[in-house]
Image (cartoon, rainbow, N blue to C red):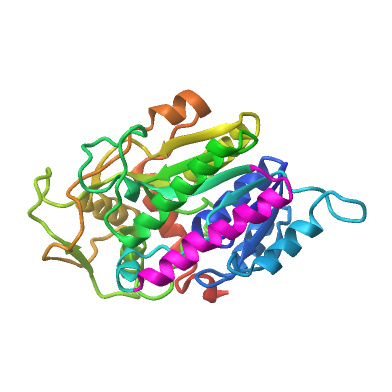
């Protein structure tokens, strides 16, 4: 298949582009490079020996997006037709979404509507959407299963929820659509080569990239938000998934829905809850020494614990995670150690 990947230069996007290329698919990438580097695709080419065609396009620029589809519409004199889309592009910082909700709704929801409109006009109706476990909200018990009612509690999560609703309505209205909604949990790690990985701009919002920057000397210490939760060691429990396991889940999903119309929802997670201290100590084993940390007050909005029930993905896609927390931390550390300033190291 020829697969268009939106947000394909980002962390999860670039690893998925690599998995798609290694699986034999042809890949187009559209990305506005607002929170990523084109260097990631150069390194994907280095690893895979294959090239993903890149277009610097923002989904809010509908005419530019239409031009990409027109050039890949399969008509006479053009490139082969796009068969499917994997949609990662979007703003993703929970805290920033609270302070800038209009920006998040405009970018994440309006951008997706533009994409769907262009896809429909060009007869491309196979889509895998990058959703999130944040759609489950605060009230659901763990583990999270796909049939639960959703109700995100922050603007970022609500943009994911609203896009899921839009896609569900599109699929219900037109049986020609093939749609997968992938709700995944906490992606960490990097490709085993250490050549591509997570490169957040500014202060990392997530635990593992922050620990990695402490380990490489870019941050003084890790701040642990809350040590008095009702969990085995008092810190929050989360479901961590290796980014390569996650990328392979996207490949499995696009292969599956390309053959089957409808709207499908799958959790992509390990089904295991790991605490902040579990992750910290695993990363310390990878580094070979202890890392400075300090327990401070709880952070508003943090849930004590959540993890996935991934059994539906196993049953429907034949997909499950294969990498342990120690492997995740080892691969993440290899990336950070070899690229102390991320892609700007190059």
Q: Is residue 328 left or right of residue 291?
A: right
In this picture, residue 311 sits left or right of residue 221? right
Would you place residue 190 above or below residue 300 in this image? above
Q: Which residues are magenta?
A: 100-125
In the image, residue 306 sits, relative to residue 163, either above or below, namely above
Q: Position of residue 265 (x, y in %)?
A: 45, 36
Please tell me which residue is depicted at 61% across the width and 33% down the height of the picture.
175
As for residue 116 lying within the magenta part, the answer is yes
Q: Can you give x and y, in whole percent of width and height, for residue 304 in the image?
A: 17, 49
- Answer whether residue 205 is visible to the viewer in this image: yes
Relative to 29, say whether 220 is above or below. below
Residue closer to the observer: 170 or 57: 170
Is residue 153 found inside the magenta-colored segment of the image? no
Whole-percent x, y for residue 220 in the image: 25, 75
**Residue in the image at 39% along x and 45% along y:** 241
- Quadrant for the N terminus in the image: top right
Q: Position of residue 53 (x, y in %)?
A: 73, 60
């Amino acid at each position: 298949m020829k697969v268009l990947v939106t947000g394909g230069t980002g962390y999860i996007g670039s690893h998925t582009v690599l998995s798609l290329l290694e699986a034999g698919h042809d890949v187009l990438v559209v990305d506005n490079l607002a929170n990523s580097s084109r260097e990631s695709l150069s390194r994907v080419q280095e690893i895979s020996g294959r090239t993903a065609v890149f277009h610097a396009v923002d989904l809010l620029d509908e005419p530019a997006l239409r031009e990409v589809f027109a050039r890949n519409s399969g008509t006479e004199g053009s490139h082969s037709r796009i068969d499917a889309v994997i949609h990662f592009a979007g703003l993703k910082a929970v805290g920033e979404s609270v302070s800038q909700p209009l920006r998040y709704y405009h970018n994440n929801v309006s951008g997706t509507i533009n994409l769907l409109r262009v896809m429909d006009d060009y007869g491309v109706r196979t889509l895998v959407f990058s959703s999130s476990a944040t759609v489950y909200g605060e009230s659901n018990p763990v583990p999270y299963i796909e049939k639960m009612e959703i109700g995100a509690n922050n603007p970022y999560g609500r943009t994911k929820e609203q896009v899921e609703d839009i896609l569900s309505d599109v699929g219900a209205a037109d049986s020609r659509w093939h749609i997968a909604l992938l709700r995944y949990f906490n992606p960490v790690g990097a490709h085993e080569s250490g050549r591509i990985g997570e490169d957040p701009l500014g202060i990392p919002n997530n635990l593992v990239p922050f620990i990695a920057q402490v380990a490489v000397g870019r941050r003084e210490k890790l701040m642990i938000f809350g040590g008095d939760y009702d969990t085995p060691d008092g810190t929050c429990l989360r479901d961590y998934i290796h980014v390569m396991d996650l990328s392979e889940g996207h490949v499995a999903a696009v292969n599956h829905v390309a053959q089957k119309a409808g709207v499908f929802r799958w959790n992509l997670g390990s089904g295991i809850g790991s605490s902040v201290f579990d992750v910290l100590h695993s990363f310390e084993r990878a580094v070979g020494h202890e890392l400075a940390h300090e327990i401070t007050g709880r952070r508003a909005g943090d849930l004590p614990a959540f993890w996935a029930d991934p059994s539906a993905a196993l049953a429907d896609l034949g997909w499950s995670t294969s990498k342990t927390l120690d492997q995740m931390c080892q691969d993440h550390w290899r990336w950070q150690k070899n690229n102390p300033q991320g892609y700007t190291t190059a």
